[in-house]
Amino acid sequence: MGGVRELDLLEAMAAKGENELYLPGARFPHNLAAYRDIEECLQGVRDILIVVPSHGLRETLLTIQPLLGPTSRVCWATKGFELHTGKLPHQVVAEVLGSERPMAVLSGPTFAKEVGQGLPTAMTIAANDNDFAGALAKALSCDNFRAYTSDDIVGVEVGGAVKNVLAIGAGMSDGLGFGANTRVALITRGLVEMTRLGTALGARRETFMGLAGMGDLVLTCTDDLSRNRRMGLALASGKTMAEAQEEIQQVVEGVKAAEAVHEVATELGIEMPICHQVYRILYAGLPPREAVSALMGRELTSEH
């Protein structure tokens, strides 16, 4: 079952058996039903998957909170820190629904279009309950989709947030014609920044070497299916952020994530120079070429 907010989209999906607006050609399975009424959607349901942008997570949780039963388990594919509070999704979930409830985050290199086409894909499920993680992995896995489990919720969530910011930077770099050397340097040093922030928040370093860290980062930075990368390409071509957003027609999570990551890193005193320059481009009007000059002109240091 799935809940949908836009009535016209709901009716179109019910009639066509697919989401022609966002995922054309991916036919719905026979046992998928769409509901506009959230109370009807959640009736008798134990496991709930939330897929909303980070700025809509708290509102969604507050909506479903009175509808949950004592055995309800919640998972989400939301990526990004909550703006202005600096909370990761699991902290928002615990704040609204309580920390004792089984909860999990789904993340990793999973472009929806390719998943919808049935192309081989792998992802990570991080949970506070091993039984829940295992049940989700079993329910989601099939011939062309494989889910790995983890208990490092913080690491998986930080990877999902920071990679979107770095993908905007990678898009700008490629859009400016800086080439493969620059792109791989940005990805590699971006991974260092991601790991630096994650471990400061309590994540395990090895998580960032896996699907939810390096895997998702490489995918999002290098393929034009990435909305964040396309935002960077558009900005490099001279478009404004509003023009780029209008062109992409979907939420670009990295825009809000850049501000949130900047706030969290500043508060913790974590050095994240690439993410900082992306933030300056998006929110302080810094020309992309000047951001590159600022990065290349930094004081020389040891790589590790």
Image (cartoon, grey):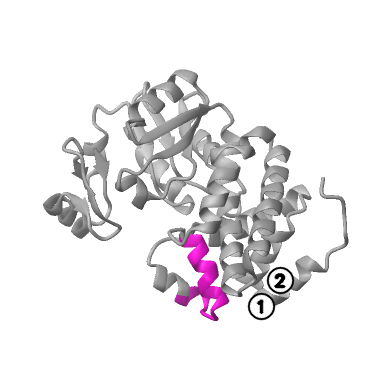
Q: Which residues are magenta?
A: 227-243
Q: Is residue 304 left or right of residue 257?
A: right
Q: Along the line of sight, which residue is nearer the eye, 228 or 115?
A: 115
How far across and how far down the image is residue 230, in percent? 48, 66
Occupied quadrant, residue 184: bottom right
For the residues bearing labels 1 and 2, Cβ distance under 8 angstroms: yes
Q: Is residue 231 magenta?
A: yes
Q: Is residue 273 above or below residue 120?
A: below
Q: How many marks?
A: 2
Secondary structure of the residue carrying numbered label 1 = loop
Establish if 140 lies above or below 175: above
Image coords of residue 192 (percent x, y) = 71, 47
Check the image and name the residue furthest to the front. 180
Compared to residue 138, the image places residue 274 above or below, namely below
Q: Quadrant of the N terminus?
A: top left
- The residue lying at 40 percent from left, 73 percent from top is 247
Position of the C terminus, as image quadrant, is: top right
Dot 1 corresponds to which residue? 287
Residue shown at the point (69%, 65%) measured from the top left = 277
| Cα separation between marks 1 and 2 | 7 Å
The crowd level at tag 1 (other Cα within 10 Å; few <14, some 14-19, many 20+) is some
Q: Is residue 81 visible?
A: no
Q: Position of residue 115 (x, y in %)?
A: 35, 45
- Quarter of the image for residue 28 reads top left
Q: Residue at x 77, y 70 (%)?
A: 294
Amino acid type, label 2: Ala
- Using residue 34 as the reference point, say whether residue 132 is left or right of it: right
Toward the top, the furthest residue is: 131
SS class, disc 2: helix
